[in-house]
Amino acid sequence: MTASQASLYQTYFYREPEPWRLNPKMDQRDWRGVFPAMTTPFKEDLSVDYDAVERQAFWLISSGCTGLVALGSLGESPTLTAEEKIQILETCRRALGDRVPLVAGISGLATPEAVALAMAAESVGCDGLMVLPPYVYRGDWRETEAHLSAVFSATPLSSMLYNNPIAYGTDVTPEQLRQLVRHPNLHAVKESSGDIRRVTALREVLGDRLAIFVGMDDVVVESVAAGAVGWIAGLVNAFPAESVRLFELAQSGPSVELRDLYEWFLPLLRLDTVPKFVQLIKLVQAEVGKGSARVRPPRLELAGAELEQAHHLIQERLQRHMVSAV
Amino acid sequence: MTASQASLYQTYFYREPEPWRLNPKMDQRDWRGVFPAMTTPFKEDLSVDYDAVERQAFWLISSGCTGLVALGSLGESPTLTAEEKIQILETCRRALGDRVPLVAGISGLATPEAVALAMAAESVGCDGLMVLPPYVYRGDWRETEAHLSAVFSATPLSSMLYNNPIAYGTDVTPEQLRQLVRHPNLHAVKESSGDIRRVTALREVLGDRLAIFVGMDDVVVESVAAGAVGWIAGLVNAFPAESVRLFELAQSGPSVELRDLYEWFLPLLRLDTVPKFVQLIKLVQAEVGKGSARVRPPRLELAGAELEQAHHLIQERLQRHMVSAV
Amino acid sequence: MTASQASLYQTYFYREPEPWRLNPKMDQRDWRGVFPAMTTPFKEDLSVDYDAVERQAFWLISSGCTGLVALGSLGESPTLTAEEKIQILETCRRALGDRVPLVAGISGLATPEAVALAMAAESVGCDGLMVLPPYVYRGDWRETEAHLSAVFSATPLSSMLYNNPIAYGTDVTPEQLRQLVRHPNLHAVKESSGDIRRVTALREVLGDRLAIFVGMDDVVVESVAAGAVGWIAGLVNAFPAESVRLFELAQSGPSVELRDLYEWFLPLLRLDTVPKFVQLIKLVQAEVGKGSARVRPPRLELAGAELEQAHHLIQERLQRHMVSAV
Amino acid sequence: MTASQASLYQTYFYREPEPWRLNPKMDQRDWRGVFPAMTTPFKEDLSVDYDAVERQAFWLISSGCTGLVALGSLGESPTLTAEEKIQILETCRRALGDRVPLVAGISGLATPEAVALAMAAESVGCDGLMVLPPYVYRGDWRETEAHLSAVFSATPLSSMLYNNPIAYGTDVTPEQLRQLVRHPNLHAVKESSGDIRRVTALREVLGDRLAIFVGMDDVVVESVAAGAVGWIAGLVNAFPAESVRLFELAQSGPSVELRDLYEWFLPLLRLDTVPKFVQLIKLVQAEVGKGSARVRPPRLELAGAELEQAHHLIQERLQRHMVSAV
């Protein structure tokens, strides 16, 4: 991080840690269960709707979620200004109290930017970080490792590596993760490669050193069967109770209730794994009365046949849900 | 662009256009010849070395380049702060006077960010814009078109679309470009798909409406043969005279001098089309005494066998060059 | 099939079906359990070692396998002449008696070739067919469907579609399979896309209409958890008892024995899913004393560092196995 | 090649070379100009129409083609039986006399199959071979090199390597070709990677050791500009005079006539580089009255909207042609 950048970021972000933060309480064993990757609600003028942030965060943890991730991809992090990011974290912290861990998504084009955001997250009381490789530049392992290590070292916060080679072009393999676990605060990994074999391979290489989270909604049951202990979830933004129940059932092994719930949920869960997942999940939220479909450009709200098709799918699922709930 | 973001950006960037800018002088016919995508020189602490920016810009146009692009990928734009971007443009403007057009690379994660940067570029006296699709998000054509149009509409500056599907994941086809040319200030396209057929296809669909620039150093001669009239160049940062000569010869058709120069230059020109092109081109600059190899993270300077190999290639080329120049 | 080709193929292959074949006994419910994709043993001069075929087939079913596939990819089908294919099927039929179903892999560059091979397989007493899309040509669905339907219609034999988009370039989706099940003798599908989500999707679209087999050794446990009822297996050629046990355990749900056996087996099972899987599996067979490592060109036996590495992996696993078996 | 396979193939194919073949006359310098990859005409029952083969071959060389390739991909080689292949070569030989070289496409799933076909081609008087890497199996370089060398060594015939990594999955790089030129009868390379840079790279690595042919119709002019001396052509099957003229003009450097002819021809030439190129080129032949659109399965003739679109494109081009020819 350059001096000028560091000072630039510090001017904006850095605050003395709250006393209670000096002894971080989030640990490896806190990475368990369903953590929503929360969407970011916008007002009509596309400014952040902080009241809605607070309500949504509170509702999610009241429904049984065991943690919360703000500033993830689903939170449209790339479109948020630095100031907005801080204020969202502060709002979530307020909503959550210290009931469940608050995790900040850490991404960016440049290393100093990611480091500064991590420090800012610490300064506003986050418990954990979900760390991505750099955007755009697909470096070799030496470069990726340096970037990730800079972020892990920047704070004592409990950290998760987010591996999503399909969306971001950089793959961190189990063998490479083995080199990263020298960071004592690296506690978890979010697997979004889409290849179920990675869960087994992670356990083979790393044992229980890292908590394995599944990062794609439509392989959650299979991933739990293979050893995942947590879920960074998407559709949870509209269906928190159903998501928490699904995860619990998956942990208990095969059952008729699990099969039925998964069968009902799966067409919706698949919306989490396509490029327009943000638009789609926000649309589901809107249709169940828990948010607005508004997104920031370059994303645009769905329109035309695509909107029609998504709307039809959602309503058909809701209809079945009503019936089966009777 | 949201109101809050617009005002945020305006606070930082926006200035009243200089009077001479109200009548933009860069036109379609000014997109011709060799435009360096200038690297950004850093001091030891990785802050921008503005003196070096000025010297480098002046040297390049003194060597026959007919325009200059700042803030491109080669300029490590993703690692520059907004303030640095503005100051680099101002420095280049000062170095160039009004001898040749100054073009600003416009990229970003969010549409308002790109729009604000375009407006800022105008406010500091740039003549043209080189516009990229959004980083990271790979939208459909409706979304990509909206993003690009927002930028083209933001200023009256003469604009170039930069198409690089391999590096950025979004491909703008000739048919899609046909829809974009309703923007009267869209004057040029930089083709970096790596597929020579695109040059012919662009001419087929668009005739002479757009000036076609080749964006990959290692197909420059072939692209000129197919109809390209300009070159956004990389190795020019170390070899401006050679680059300008190569382009002139290519325009004159097959010759022994062209063949010999291309044959000598090609192993170096290929350094422009690999993921570490920034590190490699800055290394070449360092070895010819025209800059430093320093890069900002997440990029790291080359090391070990990779450095050795690059060094050997460069020296071998320089040695041949000396001999043939006798 | 052209007249000339049909007569050509009939001259070589076609025989009157045995009386007991007129009432095919293999049904959808027979597609269950572990079916080895048997390797083809060669003598020193690379001619087929039919005695070894017979011994190997007998050993496999004596170890608990519930079916046998000859002429699969693992059987180096592309290198076998038409005559050899027939003789291998006849040999297997003799070895198996009517204890378990014999399935013939049906592949080829041209549709008539595949049809003729299917008819020949019927004429020598096979119970089922494992049918691939055409080699090399990646047609659209209309063309792929026509090819597959020609093969399914050619005989009354119980048939499996083999879907392996990675190796063969054509993907048959669950929706497309829905169109194929109008063939009453299409009873099973072998899923080798490598995407565990396909198992769930197949059940969603097709219910229990087709028996789902997993076709990649290194996702067998996960696939059974997701609903697969059978396994076209590779390493079974060297470890039939272990493979059968693994499959049984997987069907019984999570257990310590399953976890331990899978953990031991997995590094070997992964050898089934790389381009040199034939060379690797035959090497494992050779090292456990159950076959030779010989392959036909264009495949060559492993050599140098690659051989050393594979040898080391195999011996390390065998060593552990011995110990744990004490 | 196994003994049994060798004898099998020899029984069918091998004949004593004609005396005039003992002193092969095709040399490196004969690989020049336009060589049609001839389509294979079928009768209504899809048997080969040998009379049409003869007429077509004669017409092509009468129009100025300097060589002829039979049994290429465009000739639907994968669907031809061994007997048909031989008879096609014999028919072409008869049609050509010794006016221009006759080249046989050599492809197959197994090495012995390719070797036997090469020997058979020699025995019926072919002058050259166009050799592909093996179908389906994507080996490493050691394996690919062994396959290719077996074919090059099998006869003294002048040989061309056909490199088409997109269609066949195996890429032979310029550096690898450098290892292959120890075969004295390897005289040419057909470049179908689609990357124009390969032409320059081949010349850089190999100088004039190999005659470079372009293998994709829609980069012919660009490839000649970069150094190609020949063209394995597709649309030539319908437009031989136009193809020969285009190639001659391309060799003479930029001209108005070249630009106009290429502009007219290009939409048709592009039909050569899509998966259905066989169906499309045969359709063009049918529409100009020089053949039938019939293809063998797994390819099917175009139908519906796709046929309509192709038909419209062809007629539109023909209409312009008529007019401009006045």
Image: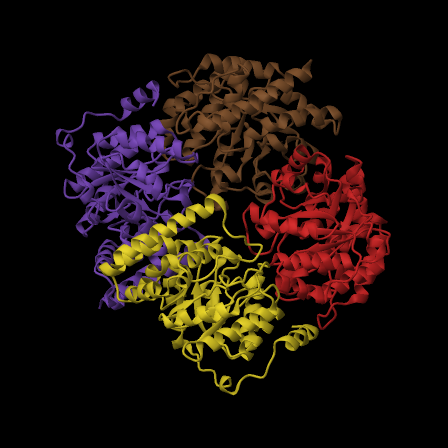
Chain colours: A yellow, B red, C purple, D brown
Q: On the picture, is C46 further left or further right than D304?
A: left
Whether residue D296 is visible: yes
The answer to which image quadrant residue C14 occupies is top left
**Residue B47: % across, % down:** 72, 70
Can you say whether C185 is above or below C196 in the image?
above
Q: On the picture, is A178 further left or further right than B230?
A: left
- For this orientation, the residue located farthest to the bottom is A19
Q: Quadrant of the C terminus of chain D?
A: top right
Q: Residue at x 64, y 38 (%)?
A: B178
Q: Residue at x 40, y 76 (%)?
A: A30
Can you say whether A115 is above or below D168 in the image?
below
Q: Residue at x 68, y 41 (%)?
A: B181
Foreground pick, B93 / B185: B185
**Residue C114: % across, % down:** 33, 31
**Residue C63: % across, % down:** 19, 52
The answer to which image quadrant residue A138 occupies is bottom right
Q: Quadrant of the N terminus of chain D?
A: top left
**Residue D34: % across, % down:** 62, 24
Foreground pick, C13 / B100: B100
Whether residue D67 is visible: no
